[in-house]
Image (cartoon, grey):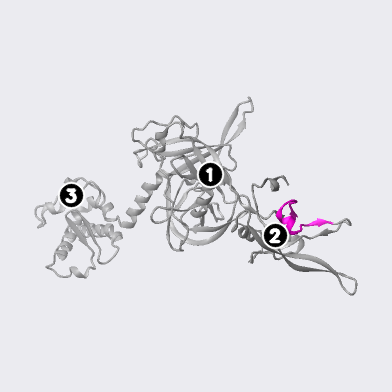
Amino acid sequence: ISVLVTSYHQAASFVLRPCRLTTKSRLRNKHITFTTADDDDALSSSSPDNQRRKLLSIVPIYTLPFLLGETNTASAAVPTSTAVQQTNVVALSSTKSLSSTLCADSEEEARISIFERVAPSVVYIDTFKQKQDVFSTDIMEIPIGSGSGFIWDNEGHIVTNFHVIQQAKSAQIAILTPNNGMKSSSTAIEPAYTSVRPGALGSNGSTTFKDFTRTVYKAKVVGVDPTKDIAVLKVDTEDNSSIKNQLRPIQLGTSTGLRVGQGSIAIGNPFGLDHSLTTGVLSGIGREVKSPSGRPISNVIQTDAAINPGNSGGPLLDSKGRVIGMATAIYSPSGASAGIGFAIPVDTVNYIVTQLIDNGQIVRPLLGVSILDSKQARQALGITKGVLILEVKPGTPAAAAGLKGLRRTDSGIIEIGDIIIAVEGASIEKEGDLFRAIEEYKPGDTVKVAVNRPQIEVTESGEADIKLKEITFSVKLIASDDSTFIQK
């Protein structure tokens, strides 16, 4: 019996030990209080705390079934020979196991609360391309991928990454809608295919979110911005205004003032596992990643919260459940999470999405020139600093200002064009620096552009010598939707 008592006591101590966060912490459940073994306040043999500690040394053999989740009080009956009243022990029984209650803390409860509040705002996206049947003229939809997104407003706008829908001809959105007796929208569909794995939230047999139904809609593209890897979709809610009240728009935070070390939470659909939650910290800010268009996305957030294929387009949250970014890329030699994930800052997302919803496109400032990739310029021409202008669009303010591009002379000699080295004092080393500098302004603004212009000088010996002369021009920026620029 003494061996059994010791074994059960050690087992009970093992169950309790992981939850002992501080030496002064007390874990309470119902009528019994457990005190940590190193509590200095419990040293007095006559103190109530010490009596409870004595009770703990007797209780484990009888209460271990409760600690392990057993609710059958008969199997834990206390022999009458003990001095402990049976009522003091049976008080442990409750609708929840004591072990789960003991191990709950405020941080854990906050994380659970955030997930339960935000998960209905996260959607599952399946994308399809069209293919003609070999044996008929029928057009079939072939699944090509999946991703994540989140509900922007009650009008049915969904925000995701551009690369999620880049190759798609159509998309379907799975949304968690509450079972509140409202009539389902007539635009909801019964999908013939979905990449979501069994046990999806809101599906039959799901043990989580039983009060929600997984409703699938066809979606249309409202607008895209490849340079920031952002797309806005929309599900049709016009036929049934009641469905608008069932959508749960996500709560936006801000990416201004973020600090390395802050907590982060990612919710998405990695590998078809819908509404998966991972946690971590912000491991870096001000990063830069390349967009699908090749342009850099600046001020990107870095996190070690696991981000995998399928998480793209899902929200990155702060410790209060507010969106601070949108998962967009990972750095990994294997293609799976390596602890380095990137998210587009929510302030950028908010600006772009608002323009896409209002105008269907993004209007950006442009210099009115085409440029050569910095790597090619370095390898082929030996240009180590600045961005080489290939062509200046005729009729643009850049042409009027006097900027010159690469050209071939009548004798067949190729003359190198101007090399942009600064915009309003900001140094330009590569094309990413140029894009970033121009985006600080609006169409119609006039900026000072410093260039190095190659000039040929003849030496006293009669040899040609190429020297770079720095010249500054004032150039008016044009809009990316300027018809003059597009036609030229």
Q: Callout 1, which amino acid? A: Asp
Q: Residue furthest bottom?
A: 460
Q: Answer above or below: position of 236 versus 49.
A: above
Label 1 neighbourhood size at 10 Å, few (<14), some (14-19), many (20+)?
A: few
Q: Which of the image's four quarters has the N terminus?
A: bottom left
Image position, residue 59 (x, y; %): 18, 57
Q: Which residues are magenta?
A: 389-408
| Towards the viewer: 331 or 449 | 449
Mark carried by residue 375: 2
SS at circle 2: helix
User: Splitting the image into 4 quarters, where does residue 425 fall?
Assistant: bottom right
Foreground mark, 2 or 1, reads: 1
SS at circle 3: helix
Mark carried by residue 76: 3
Q: Callout 2, which amino acid? A: Lys
Foreground mark, 2 or 3, reads: 2
Query: Which residue matches tag 1?
Result: 358
One can see residue 371 in this view? no
Q: Callout 3, which amino acid? A: Ala
Q: Residue furthest right?
A: 462
Image position, residue 463 (x, y; %): 88, 70
Foreground mark, 3 or 1, reads: 1
| Towards the viewer: 55 or 475 | 475
- Residue drawn at point x = 74 percent, y = 56 percent: 400
